Amino acid sequence: MIRLLDRGLEGGYIFLKNSRMRTLYDEYREKLADFVKISSISMDKKYEEELEAAAEWIEELLDNKGLSVDVVEGYGNPIIIADYQVSNSADTYLIYGHYDVQPASQEAGWLDNPFKLTESQDRLIARGVVDNKGQILLYLTVIFDLIKHGKLRHNIKFLIEGGEEVGSPNIDKFIEKYKDTLSSDCILISDGAMLGDHPILEVGFRGTLNVHLILKTAETDMHSGEYGGAIPNAAHELTTLLSKLYLKNRQINIQGFYDDVQSVKPQFAQQQKSVRYSVGELRKSTGVKEILTEPNLSIFSQTGMRPSIEATSLKSGYLEEGFKNAIPSRADAKLNIRLVPAQKPERVVTLLKRFIETKLPSYVEYQLLSTESDHNEPIVINIDNDYAKKAKRLLKEVYKNQVIEHYVGGTLPIVKYFQDLLKIPQLSIPLANQDCRMHGVNENFEIKKIIKGLEFIKQFLI
């Protein structure tokens, strides 16, 4: 392992010339190997014992390093809160992370068992190595080291949960009840990826709205020989409807949809364009052959500052082995809608219903199902504070590159709850490589990004 670090890759491993940083990385890697062994998958109830084991692993780790630790039950999977006091006059940082992970199986194409830490091409590979075990462990490793050497200059609190991958159910109720315990001066979150070699401060997240669309053309499936070519086909009607969602300029074809959407500000568009990212790079990491954006927008402006509607599931007709040769009477689509600031889920549902009623033929019936739990409003983070200024200065020093203020295409509900309930500054600073494959096969953390992350956190906390 050290052999890889001694290569002195440009801008990456210089810190390992310092024996203490080398030791810090070794300690991090050893703990990470133990942490990722635990298959703490929150969306499958059969992994409840693994989730309990992950919470116990964190509790024991924190307790052994002298932090005051509590494990709170009753809000879904166990929630760990911990704190370490340096002095009454010091600022207090609340550090958030999660120990639950997405499902993974070696049969899906992983190089090895996804719950075994492996190393390939200067990257550590395992499920959760980035999202989020590997990133929260960066903070834990640095803080333990600073405590050991008497160099920690800030009070520290941790909130580490086990339900982020399923939308953090009940975490708002937890924060409301434990507001005094969680009281701090600034919140730190690292749960995402950088833009190329650019460090970023996340300044916003798109909201999300999930809906289930059902079309019906008859009471039952009908023989395709007897009726084929003469009656409506629910599968055809659904795909025809979905094909009308976007115009050729990649804007959504729903009247009134953009009434509350602000144009992309030139300074942000220019920042995003400064990040080098090509179709070739996208193809290499995902297999995608084209980037589809509105005119003059980069992929990052498109995904961070513009809304989208994606069909994430289609179902119709006979799906088992062989051929049923029947015309489907029902077709289902699940749609994931990403919202930008000022868009409201309730209004978007109303507009979508109007679109469906306008575009569907009269002989097709529809239902549009959605619940309040499927909604998350978009968020804007205020970074006009001294903590953000400090972070930007140190990120530039450590990564030796322009810091990008980034609107994120994804959703992180905890940010909204922190904003509404704790009302204190928060910094969302992802530390992983852009091609880390979060949620995908061979999720990976580039070693030089790990080293940079350790160094940034150390500088921020001393």
Image (tube, rainbow, N blue to C red):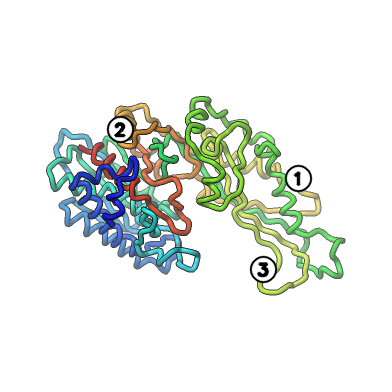
Q: Residue at x 43, y 32 (%)?
A: 405
Label 1 vs label 2, nearer the camera:
2
Could you tell me the amino acid type at mark 2?
A: Glu
Label 2 vs label 3, nearer the camera:
2
Q: Quadrant of residue 62?
A: bottom left
Q: Is residue 322 left or right of residue 5?
A: right
Q: Secondary structure at mark 2?
A: helix
Question: Quadrant location of the C terminus?
Answer: top left
Residue nearer the viewer, 101 or 12: 12
- Sequence-wise, the earlier of marks 1 and 3 is 3
Packing grade of label 1 (10 A; few <14, some 14-19, many >=20) is some
Residue occupied by mark 3:
319
Give the CA separation, mark 2 to mark 3.
55 Å
Residue occupied by mark 1:
359
Give the CA separation, mark 1 to mark 2.
54 Å
Q: Outermost residue toward the front?
A: 7
Q: Secondary structure at mark 1?
A: helix
In this picture, is 64 found above or below 86? below
Tag of residue 397: 2
- Sequence-wise, the earlier of marks 2 and 3 is 3
Where does residue 268 sit, x and y in percent of width and height?
A: 49, 29
